[in-house]
Image (cartoon, helix red, strand yellow):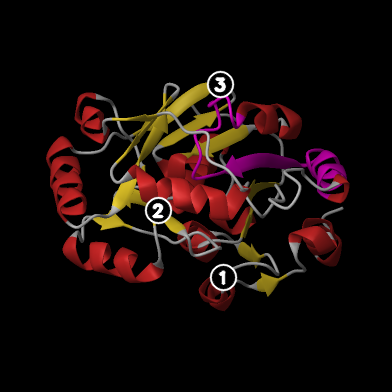
Amino acid sequence: MTQKCSGKKRIISFDLDMTLLNHKNWKIPDSALEALELLRRDSVIVIASGRNMDHEMSAMYKELINPDAIIHMNGTRVVAESEVLYEHFMDKERLRALLTFAENRGISLGLSVNGGDYYLNPDQVRAFDVIRWGESQRSFKDAWKLIEMPVRTLVYIGGPKQAKMLQEQFPDFKFPMFSDKMGADIVEKECSKAKGLLRLCQYYRIDRKETIAFGDSMNDYEMLQEAGLGIAMGNATDNLKTVADYVTDNIDEDGVWKACRYFHLI
């Protein structure tokens, strides 16, 4: 791995959804954007997301935030200054076993990639889309095609009970629930946003103690633990708040801006 001396004091890592991006209006609050501009003077700005930030549905937010580095898909791909520092693809035998178990039990999981939605039990996915967004415009395809693709992470659609069952059945995977408890990321235990953050510390030659992480969901849990300062949004899950060093206000109450002011970062 190439190393870079950035001359910056710290690394500040932000989850995207419901940390920077408000799902009520699909906008990043003006106060958060202003905070980012002030922070980048002396801090490395990082997006740490369960999303592939290069996907067409996410690229607009990447361009708006203009991060120095990105932890994509829960740490399965880490990019800094356009250099790929790390990539991980899901083990095919693990993937096959997971798909078989889910299909036999009517569990919805899969992945949206290359313009297609490769999900088992798509009716449940449609139903959850309607609850979330009022409609579903997905183009569903055979989920078993995922075996032939390079898969980094998956998405589970459903409640906490089935997610817990999957976790017990497949200990090589993690199933961190979304903050709305209507689904979860599926990622192999080898990867996390926290490990992505440590890779960026190595790249930028910045000590872990000089890192700050913002988040709201359980896929931020390890990152908030690992960071020198872990900040949970006011709208975060209760479990995440228990490991945070500080809980700020909700996203629609200028939580990012207020936390940055509280810690004299801006």
Please state which of residues 215 and 183 is positioned toward the viewer in this rendering.
183
User: In front: mark 1 or mark 2?
Assistant: 2
Q: Amino acid at mark 2?
A: Ile
State which quadrant residue 158 falls in: bottom left
Please state which of residues 65 and 82 is positioned toward the viewer in this rendering.
65
Magenta residues span 32-58
* 161 left or right, relative to 85: left
> At x 57% / y 24%, what residue is drawn?
56
- Check disc 3 and report the residue beneath it: 82
Q: Secondary structure at mark 1?
A: loop
For marks 1 and 2 on the same chain, the one whose residue lies earlier in the sequence: 2
Q: Amino acid at mark 3?
A: Ser
Q: Of the numbered discs in the image, which one, if any, rests on residue 237?
A: 1
For marks 1 and 3 on the same chain, the one whose residue lies earlier in the sequence: 3
Q: Is residue 101 magenta?
A: no
Q: Position of residue 124 (x, y in %)?
A: 38, 51
Q: Secondary structure at mark 3?
A: loop
Q: Position of residue 251 (x, y in %)?
A: 75, 59
* 161 left or right, relative to 31: left
Q: Position of residue 237 (x, y in %)?
A: 56, 70
Q: Quadrant of the N terminus?
A: top left
Report if the CB atoms under discs 1 and 3 are less than 8 Å apart: no
Report if the CB atoms under discs 2 and 3 are less than 8 Å apart: no
- Check disc 2 and report the residue beneath it: 157
Q: CA distance from mark 1 to mark 2?
A: 18 Å
For marks 2 and 3 on the same chain, the one whose residue lies earlier in the sequence: 3
Q: Secondary structure at mark 2?
A: strand
Q: CA distance from mark 2 to mark 3?
A: 32 Å
- How many callouts does the rendering have? 3
